[in-house]
Amino acid sequence: MNAAIIDMILNKRTEIDELWSEEIANYKTTTSTITPYMREQLNKDFLSLLFSHISQGDISVDGTLERFFDKVLRANMPLEYLTQGLQCFRRIVLEIITEEDIQKNAAFEIYREVDRWMDPILNSVVENSSRLWERTVSIQKSALLELSAPLIPVFQHISVMPLIGTIDTERAKLIMENLLEGVIQYRSQVVLIDITGVPVVDTMVAHHIIQAADAVRLLGSTCILVGIRPEIAQTIVSLGIDLSLFPTKSTLQKGMAKALEVTNQQIVNEK
């Protein structure tokens, strides 16, 4: 930034500080739970960071800006807090500087300088926010996928895999992995795949289920498909899908009875 413009901004620091602090104090958020004192300190750090960017150069390259982002995130402040603070600061700086008796060309130069000065910070805000959002989504997606395809041992040598929601290719791969690992880990002789919570069973979903059942059979275990609702049965028949290679039952209870039969077990009521 032009040295004369930097001096002009720094000479007006007190006035800029008062106007910016007053305006940013009016920003309300429902997501943050920080105390008023912590909020005040965060605002001071924000303003100090902006003036450091003016007087010391681009702070988006030395980690200073990223460390402040981390502090904002820990305070659970939204991205809007950063963007509004930056836009507010730029507007106040331009308004105060252009109040001076300057030539028209000088005013345009100031606008260009301030815009060029803001770009690295705005770009860094977007980049850091995008990276954080992608990382958060990735972590949440992985956690949901892992929780959405568990293999649960219920009796000796009998396990159940309840499936809920839509099954896509990525999730089908995870189902297969969890299924095969669980069969070995729990020494399951019978696995019940419960599709009661699967809203739609189309050709692709049926294909994935058949693949899973075939893989279980190759390990020497039996796979029973349960939760066949009337509408799903009609869909399977209309699509010409062959499920004759492994047993199917309408309910988990009936499937469990079949699994106990296959493993030569029975439930006995003690008197």
Image: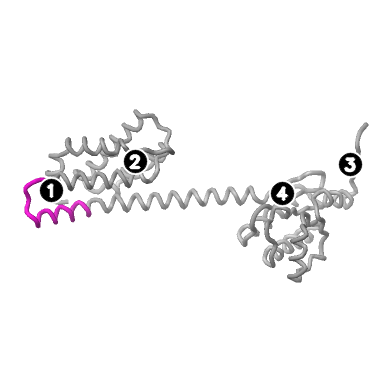
Q: Given contact means CB atoms under 8 Å apart, are the residues at marks 2 and 4 in contact? A: no
Q: Earlier in the sequence, mark 1 or mark 2?
A: 2
Q: Nearer the viewer, mark 1 or mark 4?
A: 1
Q: Residues within 10 Å of mark 1 (few under 14, many from 20)?
A: some
Considering only vertical position in the picture, is 41 above or below 264? above
Residue at the spot x=22%, y=38% of the render?
A: 19
State which mark lies toward you, 4 or 3.
3
* Element type where label 1 sits in the image: loop
Was residue 234 drawn as part of the magenta stretch in this picture?
A: no
Identify which residue, 24 or 139, lies in the foreground.
Answer: 24
Q: Which residue is mark 3?
A: 267
Instruction: Kindly identify which numbered label has been placed on residue 98.
Output: 1
> What residue sits right under mark 2 in the picture?
68
**In the rendered structure, which disc, 4 or 3, sits on the residue that comes first in sequence?**
4
Looking at the rendered structure, the secondary structure element under dot 3 is loop
Ranked by sequence position, the earlier of labels 2 and 4 is 2
Question: Is 107 colored magenta in this rendering?
Answer: yes
* Pair 1/2: label in front: 1
Kindly indicate the quadrant of the structure image that contains residue 49: top left
Q: Position of residue 15 (x, y in %)?
A: 17, 37
The reply to whether discs 4 and 3 touch (Cβ–Cβ < 8 Å) is no
Q: Residues within 10 Å of mark 4 (few under 14, many from 20)?
A: many
**Distance in Å between CA atoms under marks 4 and 3:** 22 Å
Which mark is first along the chain, 4 or 1? Answer: 1
Q: CA distance from mark 1 to mark 4?
A: 68 Å
Residue 50 placement, left or right of 97: right
- Numbered mark located on residue 173 in the image: none
Residue 151: assigned label? 4
Q: CA distance from mark 3 to mark 1?
A: 86 Å
